[in-house]
Amino acid sequence: MKYMNRLFVLCCLLLSSGLTLVVSAQNADAPKPSAVNQTEARKAPDWVNSGIMYQINLRAFTKEGTLKAAEAKLPDLAKLGITIVYFCPMFTADDDMRQEFWSPRQKKSGMNSPRNPYRMKDYFSVDPEYGTADDLVKFVQTAKTLNIKVLLDLVYLHCGPAAVFIKDHPDFVKRDKDGNAVNAAWAFPALNFDNPELREYLYGNMEFLLKKFDVDGFRCDVGDGIPLDFWVEGRKRIDKIKPNLAMLNEGSKPDAQNFAFDMNYGFPIYPAIKNVMDGKNPVSHLAEAKKTQLNRQPKGGRFIHYIDNHDITNDDYEKRREHHWGKDGVEAALVACFTFDGIPLLYNGQEIADKQRHSIFGNLAIDWSKANTEEAKSRFEFCQKLIQLRKKHPALQAAGSITFTKNSKPDMVLSFERKLDNEKILVVINLRNEPVAVDVESEITPTAVLFEKGKQIKHLSFELPSYGWYIGK
């Protein structure tokens, strides 16, 4: 399923629960704070606030597609500066060949594989395709020696039609009046959260994964589609096992971060970035989308920001961003993701400007032999620079505030301030493929350049090349 269809489903789930997801607002005064905006997000571990996240799709990350091969590349991620790794699901996928239980994207991929990692057969066993439980234990241990946290993906909205628990517990999935399984989105049987025994089974799974593998938390697939009270209770239980863990919600529910989650996905910021970069909307559209997001979330809420992930580029639906925006455009968009509030995410090979087709349905791997090309080395150094900048300056991390400022070219330029304690940083980014001279209104008088592709020609006046930027304090 295309990424936008997935976002549509998430939006429908929000609407069905009586909540509103506002994608953008053309008027700066239009977004009104919600009641949740008057509450406080739960306190997150420091490693979340300062984190740099990297998503691994094992089938694309290495040609072997295994945990052992991924472990061998951990030093490269540490060199890049990554502090958090999250995996696409690696537990046993359903091998049922009946295509009425395959997702549309699964069929369209052409892989003819029933083994969709987001269609679970057994939540408690590592899929032999990727290795063994011991391989995962060793991966986590190696990651810890490199100061990298590890998150596993929980897929609890649905399961496969041959899930191991269905025979003994048929009521673990939703049933119609005739006793037939009811499918959730993507043609997979829906788990029945009205059943207390199903909830206990899944709580047991969360506890098992923490105890067995010593991971640092979870990314929760389509978290908004699952009752929030399930996540609240689950969080209470796993906090007793490992208090400093983190949970990432693939969703935007405004109250998700009050009690259960430490991070939400950056919906609707990716679509706003995409529409701006594709030339469909002025750059001011992105600023308004961000303001709306902040007004609909609790104070101190955290988001992950990205321009690529396994939903966006798999199976050539949109291709890697490099094909659409080019090297300079991608880097300008990454500057925005790394200087926004929240936690930036890089996906599978993005740090070497990978252009390969990826799939979660088969092994289409990154060509790491290209990591020594000038283009790849340039991108790696660029990402390193952004990561080092964010680590060095707490105002650029999740706890820093963000305030959008007026500028003389709102159709082309994004400008905002980041502040934390006594540190104040001004960010100005040209998100258009043409040079621009722009004046910015800001209380910050930058005297030190932190990172620039362009220049400040006089006080708060900038000359920026195509896709250029200025970051100063």
Image (tube, helix red, strand yellow):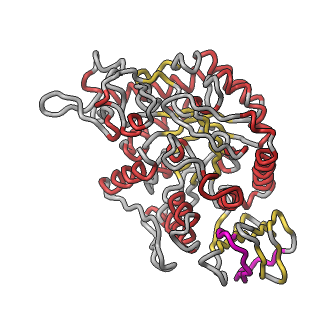
Q: Residue at x 43, y 21 (%)?
A: 122
Determine the main secondary structure of the stretch shown in magenta: loop
Q: Residue at x 76, y 45 (%)?
A: 376
Locate residue 280, reporting x and y percent: 51, 69
Q: Quadrant of residue 299?
A: bottom right
Locate residue 30, reporting x and y percent: 45, 77
Using the image, determine if residue 179 lies above or below residue 414. Answer: above
User: Left or right of 28: which side holds 447?
Assistant: right
Which one is in front, 407 or 466?
466
Q: Which residues are magenta?
A: 430-446
Which one is in front, 275 or 183?
275
Locate residue 204, reporting x and y percent: 44, 24
Q: Residue at x 40, y 25 (%)?
A: 114
Q: Residue at x 21, y 31 (%)?
A: 175
| Quarter containing the C terminus | bottom right
User: Left or right of 266: which side holds 232?
Assistant: left
Q: Quadrant of residue 160?
A: top left
